Image: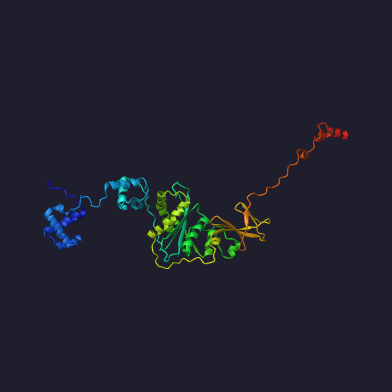
Amino acid sequence: MAGRDIIMATQEELKRLNVIHKVLDKSITQIEAAGILDLTDRHIRRMAARIAKEGDKGIAHRLRGKTAHNRTLDKVKTKALNLCKNIYEGFSPTLASEKLFERDKIKVSRELLRTWFIKEHIAYASRKARPHRNWRERKTHYGQMVQADGSHHDWFEGRGPWCVLMGQIDDATSKVSAEFHDYEGTLPFMASFKSYIEAKGIPISVYIDRHTTYKSNKKPSIEDELEDKEPLTQVGRALKELGVDVIFAHSAQAKGRVERLFRTFQDRLVKEMRLRKIRSIEEANAFLRGYLPIYNKRFSVPAVKSADLHRPLPKGIDLDRILCKRTEHTLRNDWTVAHDKKLYQVENNIKAKKVTMEERTDGSMLIWHKNMALKFKEVTKRPQKIIEAPKSRLSTRAHMPPKDHPWHSFRFGSSEKEEALVGAL
């Protein structure tokens, strides 16, 4: 072997070289070699001719060691990495590749970016291994089931307040509807669900978790037990009036589609809003109105069956009267109603024991009695109680006789003093 060139070859190439030598030695035929290597006999002839002419180094690919014609220029790589370390800090290779092309006109594949990130030790969030779970088949129709939930997160990365993204995703198509709200509760859910109904219609069912906003933990009353009813939350009552079936999930993984949506949004949506310097709920909701149609067009899938099961809202139904927080209160003798630590004066002269307070999604409030909206105003200054002045100290204090009065001697109970008192009297 002394004096011979060292050939760098892969194990696959060494295997081919060994077979080609058998062909050159005429130990096997070219057709037999083609069957062994799973190649065409034409390729075997070409390889045998090159090795016979160039020697063993002819087995190596001709492009080995040469610069690729589509190699990314060093200045493009440097610019892309600088952007990923600064403006696109924390972006995954997939999202960074999209933003580099969309905003900076730099076309770099995500796998090439991933290789650069590993070499440059650029950190980014990656998916963790998940435990095994049984897969549930999608619903077959659009509008057959909607998964709904809220996601608490620092959506503005410190530029604005913490808030909640109330989202709905169709189980059959993965089409998304979402709104930002201050908190996760009854009115935020109703407001986001109202927007969903106005845009798409009433779905057949809603898949939600067992949060106290959605499922009541109260024990059924005697009347409920007699009528075989379960206590309902305000959300449950509203969905029942709309004819929407409620399905409660026993775990977060059961409604995995909406949970994965929130993980995606906590990565992609947060970074999109960072690039646009969004810092308030109003700005974020305005951005969503333009972002979600693009997102749905890219990531939604066609339903198995084409029929849309969303029902249009029937005419004559006031959606605001259903999607509201409804509470029954006693009407006092002075026509006032106490609600949420506030006092309201009803201006209508009615005879009623009970009235219904409605808190609506737009922040307004109404008082109803027998389908009649009552006029009222908040009592901002309550009348103060009249406190009687205390009686004078002299009038309430017991009379004390002077020191030389016989009473002082009598109250000690001695016999001599008693006799002295009797003599004095």
Q: Is residue 223 left or right of residue 74?
A: right
Image quadrant in which the C terminus is located: top right
Q: Where is residue 358? Give x, y as percent.
A: 58, 58
Query: Does the image show residue 212?
Result: no
Query: Does the image show residue 176?
Result: yes
Q: Where is residue 59? Give x, y as percent.
A: 17, 54
Colour approach in the figure? rainbow
Q: Is residue 14 left or right of residue 180?
A: left
Residue placed farthest to the top in the image? 404
Q: Where is residue 70? Give x, y as percent.
A: 25, 52
- Total numbered labels placed on residues in the image: 0
Q: Where is residue 1? Give x, y as percent.
A: 13, 48
Instruction: Give the quadrant of residue 295.
Output: bottom left
In this view of the protein, which residue sits in the foreground, 398 or 158? 158
In this view of the protein, which residue sits in the foreground, 373 or 397? 373
| Residue depicted at 58% across the width and 63% down the height | 225
| Residue depicted at 45% across the width and 52% down the height | 284
Q: Is residue 205 left or right of residue 65?
A: right
